Image (cartoon, rainbow, N blue to C red):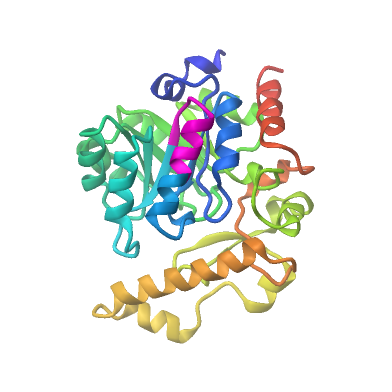
């Protein structure tokens, strides 16, 4: 099997069909630069930057350092108050592709296509996959049950074949894969590429604390749990002693407010922003009294390496 023949490689003109997934408060320019140098691509959440001036500078930094596809992840629902400004800046700076999350991508697709930018849309089921395909999406990011962060409800073993049956655009599998052999198996299952994040957290270029990185080495798949504490939406985290102490479910007040139809939009925005601050503290703290996002693919992380070392190991394992 020649990985360079995968549709993701054709779409983005890369050598190996992997997107280094956009990870909140983890992904940065240095990681993406090394990803592109290694023959894959990488995306960064727009919300990793405090304002659009910082976002613009980051895009320009990557484009100055390397010639290759750069993606930006946009939260496209009303919880992201900077959405329209982020969309405008990314189009002005001519990024290569968007990854849209948590809302309708229709406006993003229209504006991106008018600027010759591709749009890949996060989905968790066939229904929404067909909707974004009808809107003109260029590819689908199939967020599987095994994904890190905001995971879907369905395992990749079921979701990928179902999407391949119902959709005609490329399907990029997100979740649960941390080895080259796993990449090969996903392509054989029908995926046209993969989005991989957790295996890149414990890298030298990642801007998170050494404790966060070491946790990805020390913990495994069995230590990943779902919490609604951070954003109101189920999110996978490492089950550290601190997480065990604070619990993983919203309290009665949080649940009550989220069910109030009049307040729902604003409460979700508040909860999301509060969760972001919690994650930011977690990402840069030097203590285990934190909440660290990761997926079960940390099972395959055995040491802290460079981004390039991770990529080369994936390629070598793929070809074994």
Q: Residue at x 55, y 13 (%)?
A: 2
What count of labels does the image hold?
A: 0
User: Any magenta on residue 66?
Assistant: yes
Q: Is residue 298 above or below residue 40?
A: below
Q: Choose between 81 and 248: the one closer to the eye.
A: 81
Q: Residue at x 75, y 59 (%)?
A: 211
Q: As rendered, which of 265 and 96 lies closer to the eye?
A: 96
Which of the image's four quarters has the C terminus? top right
Q: Percent x, y for residue 281? A: 61, 68
x and y percentages locating residue 298 in the rendered image? 68, 47
Query: Does 47 sit left or right of 107 as displayed?
Result: right
Indicate the quadrant containing the N terminus: top left, top right, bottom left or bottom right.
top right
Say whether residue 169 is left or right of residue 19.
left
User: Left or right of 28: which side holds 233?
Assistant: left
Q: Which residues are magenta?
A: 58-70
Answer above or below: position of 236 versus 317. below
Q: Which residue in the rendered view is the most extreme toward the bottom?
A: 253
Picture quadrant where residue 205 is located: top right
Q: Quadrant of residue 130?
A: top left
Residue 88 percent across, percent down from the top left: 28, 47
**Residue drawn at (37%, 72%) of the image:** 268
Q: Is residue 159 visible?
A: no
Residue 177 on the magenta segment = no
Determine the main secondary structure of the stretch shown in magenta: helix
- Between 42 and 29, the residue placed more toward the observer is 29
Q: Residue at x 55, y 56 (%)?
A: 25
Residue 75 visible in the shown view? yes
Image coords of residue 75 (percent x, y): 37, 54
């Amino acid at each position: 099997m020649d990985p360079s023949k995968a549709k993701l490689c054709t779409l983005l003109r890369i050598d190996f069909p992997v997107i280094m997934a956009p990870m909140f408060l983890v992904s940065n320019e240095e990681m993406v630069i090394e990803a592109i140098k290694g023959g894959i691509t990488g995306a960064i959440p727009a919300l990793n930057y405090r304002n659009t001036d910082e976002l613009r500078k980051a895009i320009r930094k990557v484009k100055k350092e390397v010639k290759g596809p750069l993606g930006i992840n946009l939260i496209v629902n009303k919880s992201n108050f900077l959405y329209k400004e982020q969309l405008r800046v990314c189009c002005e700076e001519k990024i290569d592709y968007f990854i849209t999350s948590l809302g309708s991508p229709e406006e993003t697709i229209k504006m991106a296509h008018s600027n010759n930018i591709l749009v890949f849309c996060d989905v968790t089921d066939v229904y929404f996959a067909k909707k974004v395909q009808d809107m003109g999406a260029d590819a689908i990011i199939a967020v599987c049950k095994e994904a890190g962060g905001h995971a879907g409800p369905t395992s990749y073993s079921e979701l990928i074949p179902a999407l391949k049956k119902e959709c005609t655009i490329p399907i990029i599998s997100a979740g649960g894969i941390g080895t080259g052999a796993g990449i090969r198996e996903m392509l054989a299952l029908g995926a046209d590429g993969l989005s991989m994040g957790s295996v890149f957290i414990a890298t030298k270029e990642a801007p998170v604390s050494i404790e966060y990185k070491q946790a990805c080495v020390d913990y495994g798949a069995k230590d990943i749990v779902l919490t609604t504490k951070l954003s109101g939406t189920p999110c996978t985290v490492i089950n550290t002693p601190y997480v065990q102490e604070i619990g993983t479910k919203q309290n009665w007040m949080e649940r009550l407010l989220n069910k109030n139809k009049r307040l729902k939009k604003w409460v979700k925005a508040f909860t999301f922003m509060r969760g972001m601050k919690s994650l930011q503290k977690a990402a840069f703290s030097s203590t285990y009294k934190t909440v660290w996002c990761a997926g079960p693919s940390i099972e395959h992380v055995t040491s802290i390496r460079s981004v390039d070392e991770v990529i080369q190991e994936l390629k070598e394992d793929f070809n074994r």
